[in-house]
Amino acid sequence: MAEYTLKLRRYDPQSGEAPYYEEYRVDLEPHRSVLEAILMVKNEQDGSVGIRCSCRAAICGSCGVRINGRPGLACHTHLDKAANTGVNSDGTTILVEPMGNMPVIKDLIVDMDAVHWKKIQRVTPWLINKEPVPEREYIVPHENMVDVTQSMACIQCGACVSDCLSMEVDPLFVGPAASAKAYRFVGDPRDAEQFERLKDLAEDPHGIFDCTHCFTCIDACPKGVAPMSQIMRLRRITTNDHHIVDRNNGERHERAFTSLIRGYGLLHEAELLPRSYGGDSWFGKFHPAAGQELLSSLPVVVKGLMRGKMSPKLALLGHRIPSRDLKAVQAIFETVESKDRRYELNLYITGYEDGDEDVGVPAAVAAGDDGMPSAPGPDPHQPTSASESESA
Amino acid sequence: MPAHDVLIIGAGLAGQRAALAAADAGASVAILSKVHPVRSHSVAAAGGINAALNPEDSWESHAYDTVKGSDYLGDQDAIEIMCRAAPDEILWLEHAGVTFHRSDTGHLGTRAFGGASAARTYYVADITGQAILHVLYEQLMKHHERVDRYEEWFTTTLLQDEDGNCIGCVARDIRTGTLEVFNAKSVILASGGAGQAFKPTTNALICTGDGIAQAYRIGAPLMDMEMIQYHPTTLAENGFLITEGARGEGAHLYNAQGERFMEKYAPNKLELASRDVVSRAEQTEINEGRGFPDGTIALDITRVPRKRTLEALREIVNIGKDFAGVDITREPIHIKPGMHYIMGGVKTDFDGQTPIPGLYAAGEVACVSVHGGNRLGANSLLDTLIFGRRSGEHAAQRARGVAMPKAPTSVLADAQGEIDEILNRGTDPARPGRRVSEIKNELGETMNRYVAVYRDEAGLATAREIVQRLKAEAPSAAIDDKGTVFNQDVLAAIELGYMLDVAESIVMAAQERRESRGAQFRTDFPERNDEDWLHHITVSLNGDGPALGTAPVTITKWQPQARTY
């Protein structure tokens, strides 16, 4: 047994008072969950503490909260781990607050309808059947079904939504959970509207290209859904397979990144903007939109120069790395591009047979050239690099 | 005041399936649930759903396995309906978008399951219930114009007119505390089981027997209530479920002496015998001192190829890691039998109709009875979907011939009075009352001690005494929260009353059945006795107290035989 102090953020909408913190002491074994501690408080000390909960086993998705500042499920977080991570890590105090990015109803209960479920509804969250619907089942590769199982494993707990940084800046951003839901249809070979779904989500200024690639949702997800990975996969299928040009210019921006890295080994910031609009061609620099954006970013450029974050030389010539290193970088491009299929991360597919010790690394499922993730290549069990590869 | 042709209470698989079917049949539909639909306990169903869909398989074989699994207490006409309809239901789900895992040829894949003579369990990794539940919710979102959803509404009472027809319910909006009358031409209960009357249980905190008790309180008979399923593989410490899919994929059970003891109890089916058989075998090993010191058995999943485990049993890999500190791909995990499912429930016919006109029930809340004395693994999802659909269709059809009822507004005042009574408890310091959670705990521990795998008259009599004392204590149980917004305390007090009604009927039926059949094993009557007990036991409210009755078992093709695996 160990003694913990649960510091709960309380809010009673009927009281007319601001939220406040209340501390409770609980005696529980360190491997018990934060939810068990809260339920102990509810049962023995104060039944008015509000928290949604049901299954206690990380499957119903009810008890999403912030624990010491980090989003997660209360039932899925051990007391000792909770007390030693995050903002209050003194080993005994556990701060529990409602999730972010959503209005609070009472105590630890947030209004998921107002944010989370609205966004889910935004992505046309049902299968649009390919016609004709077969008399029996659709015949589809096992790998595809295992592949979409990763996003199907989402329990709609909202932990990723809670701490999504892009959503904090742009509350209209479709967000990680809804994007993962979208992948569940985009990756499903039975769905008839892959292109339409992707075009819709790419052209929406608050769509998939609004994600800033910060990894917070991957960290937050208690089920390994890795929402950001699903967003990146949506983007790759959008750009590489469907060549959809999005309103955020995300596709060309991504291309500019890869072409610069290939050319210089490091990012060449001054080139990024023109290339994002005009492509690799030299004349691209004179693309009107590039000029416009350059003009509007001038204050930032000037600030950067004044603070020494860049020099005129770097801005004009870009970074240089030794040619041996540059060759090594380019070799990575060659290796990746020589594969006839794109490899994608997937939790449910390990790519390893028994006996391999190094199985902590999730491996890959390949996406076919037709844009439809399809069966892995000739040797699906070949251990592959865990890093997501870009086929430019 | 909302008014619909069909009102569905509960939004798990049975409720959502009923809603979609009723809407398809042209009815206006409301679905109401005390939690958001995807939080329903159907989400926890792991292993899969049975259907004889392969050409080599047959519905007769599925039905026979189910009848045998039920220890001949299942009604064979209802079982036949369920097993015949199963393949089409799987295809319906597949077309609706369920991501069933495939075989190498891209057709629907199957895994083996307990008590089945063929591999006929269709699955999505080990999150089958979750996958189906979320896909049905996708369909509800798609059909939002035809199905009104009332999410986080708590039903306090069912309503009847002077002729005894069920005409709706009173429910409390949990977010605001507002009470509302829901009028409906037909009402379908789909509110699930009552596992929280036991402690520990694999069931979620929301499984408090609400619908069973609500129906019972307006006179609907309950049936097969003594039949409580103890699942063979639950975690020792907290009762969490380890799916039967693990054994389906090839895991073995060992006692502390390293013996694969199922060889003694079920030489043919071994670990894949019926759940009652495996649970009893484990309990015998434990009781006779061959279990581990913490009263457990070892489940060895390391035999299953690691890649397969990570792909198809991902959820229990996580549960092992997160809740037991065990890597199940490398070492055995300790388990024991734990309360899992109630075969009994509100008595219905195979269209879901209860004897109360206008009231239907489907899923775990109901007893058709397709599970009889013991439910086969992966038959519960099937039960919810088939009888959910049939209830929805029939309720919609019934609604066509009925005028929209209108409950008197006085019912609202009555319901508010009951809630106010709870809120005002504990104001007299001389009579503080026990805490709701304390009474609930004592109930759960009592049931798990005396009404478990092995039972006898002395233990059941003790349980009955305790339950009756708790029933007397419950009305004065005090609560802390006096607010109206998300007052979970008030709901817990109401749920306690539901659980106590359900527990009482379970104990009474178990006392009454003086034989051993299916999940009911009486050490004082260890044999099955078809001559005296091949019938259902019913419990219904008579005046103020419960009264026992019987109902015949329907036998069509399969005469009772000795049951070995």
Image (cartoon, rainbow, N blue to C red):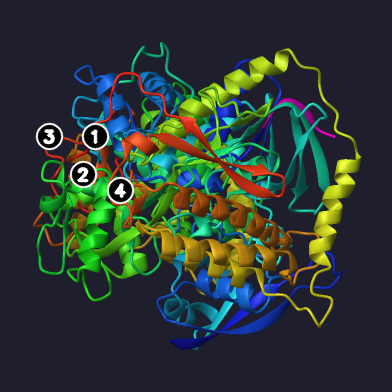
Circle 3 SS class: loop
Q: Position of residue B427 (x, y in %)?
A: 84, 76
Q: Which mark is residue B116?
A: 1
Circle 4 SS class: helix
Q: Is label 3 in contact with label 1 (beta carbons under 8 Å)?
A: no
**Which residues fall within the magenta stretch?**
B1-7
Q: Residue A378 carries which label?
A: 3
Q: Where is residue A230 in the image (x, y as percent from the top left)?
A: 42, 45
- Which mark is nearer the camera, 3 or 1? 1
Against A249, residue A32 (above or below) is: below
Q: Is label 1 in contact with label 4 (beta carbons under 8 Å)?
A: no
Image point 42% across, 13% down: which residue? A131
Circle 2 SS class: helix
Image point 27% across, 26% down: which residue? B64
Query: Tag 2: residue type?
Result: Leu
Q: How crowded is mark 3: few (under 14 residues within 10 Å), some or many (20 or more)?
A: few
- To the question of a shared chain for discs 3 and 1, the answer is no
The image quadrant of residue B138 is top right
Image point 85% across, 52% down: which residue? B416
Q: Residues within 10 Å of mark 4 (few under 14, many from 20)?
A: many
- To the question of a shared chain for discs 3 and 2, the answer is no
Q: Is label 2 in contact with label 1 (beta carbons under 8 Å)?
A: yes
Disc 2 marks which residue?
A: B272
- Which mark is nearer the camera, 1 or 4? 4
Q: Which callout, 1 or 4, points at the residue further toward the start of the chain?
A: 1
CA distance for labels 3 and 2? 36 Å
Q: Is residue A106 left or right of residue B92?
A: right
CA distance for labels 3 and 1? 36 Å
Disc 4 marks which residue?
A: B276
CA distance for labels 2 and 1? 8 Å
- The chain letter for the residue carrying disc 4 is B
